[in-house]
Amino acid sequence: MAKVIWITGASSGFGMAVALHLLKQRKHVVCVSARRAHLLEMLVRKGAYAYPLDITKTADIGQVQEAIEADHGPIDAVLVNAGYGVYGPIEEVPEEAVRRQFEVNVFGAVETVRSVLPSMRREKRGRIVLTSSSAAHVSSAGMGYYAATKHSIKAIGTALRQEVGDLGIEVVMVEPGVVKTAFGQVALNENYMTPRVPDYQSQMDDMKTFMLKAFERAPEVDHTRDIMIKALIEEHVKPVYRTTRGSLALGFISRLFPARMYDAIVKQAIGRLH
């Protein structure tokens, strides 16, 4: 059965990969949103419907949802995918960068969810797929703020799943680890906060080197993309999908070991790859 699917953050990474693959099927109505509207043009040429959206302007999110439903009917599934990472020490990441990290990754995601729920409740059906991360379970030096947003998504998604489960609405969280997308280059170049305080310099250098090597060795996007598509369109789905070995291992380590031992394991792993 053809579905009306809305994908946020579709201008790159998982969002674009999912949209392109769905468009190849030529079965579903694929609606895409992103702040950089010009990057959606390729998807439009392949049959998508573009709705430009800056996810930090929460008042606009409801307008996009209403426009999609006016054009195509009720939204069957939404991939809440817009997000990015800011890396740097807790003390040094500027307040405005911290706020924007939460505005995009958390508040934008929440408002997207809130915008589709009234219609889904009326229809007594719908699927909300949240792009989370292995960082929803762990954190490390230099990644505190990004990990905090993903911890938030996990908490929100878990509560939401319980709240709407009896209303015919399903909530799915997809938790990839490191995957080859543009996310890493943006996070480690454009959004990497080079320490000004010498005390942090060595640790942050090690973390950046570790992450760059991790992205070099990371799996391609295909498996995570396919899991996201399954979460959007298949009849029977699981509440949570962990799509990489790293996402499985990190969650296991964080639960298994005491805090000090976890810190030591992470520090040793980063030092080994430096």
Image: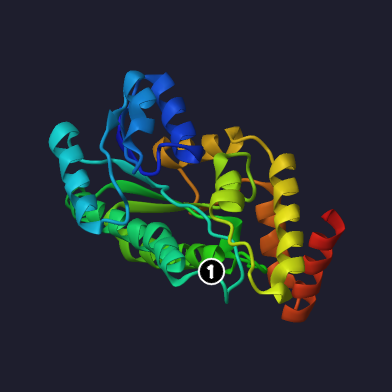
What residue do we see at 81% from left, 73% from top?
A: 264
Comparing 56 with 223, the one in front is: 56
Vertical placement of 35 versus 41: above or below?
A: below
- Would you say residue 1 is visible in this rendering? no
Residue 198 image-quadrant placement? bottom right
Comparing 7 with 245, the one in front is: 7
Q: What kind of colouring is applied to the model shown?
A: rainbow
Vertical placement of 45 versus 251: above or below?
A: above
Quadrant (top left, top right, bottom left, bottom right) of the N terminus: top left
Q: Residue 177: where, in percent of width, then height?
A: 63, 51
Q: Residue 76: where, in percent of width, then height?
A: 28, 40
- Would you say residue 55 is visible in this rendering? yes
According to the picture, the residue beneath numbered tag 1 turns out to be 93
Residue 70 image-quadrant placement? top left
Quadrant (top left, top right, bottom left, bottom right) of the C terminus: bottom right
Vertical placement of 114 versus 226: above or below?
A: below
Q: Residue furthest right?
A: 272
Q: Residue 153: where, in percent of width, then height?
A: 45, 62
Vertical placement of 194 versus 50: above or below?
A: below
What residue do we see at 32% from left, 52% from top?
A: 55
What residue do we see at 56% from left, 40% from top?
A: 182
Q: Residue 165: where, in percent of width, then height?
A: 35, 59
What residue do we see at 40% from left, 54% from top?
A: 171
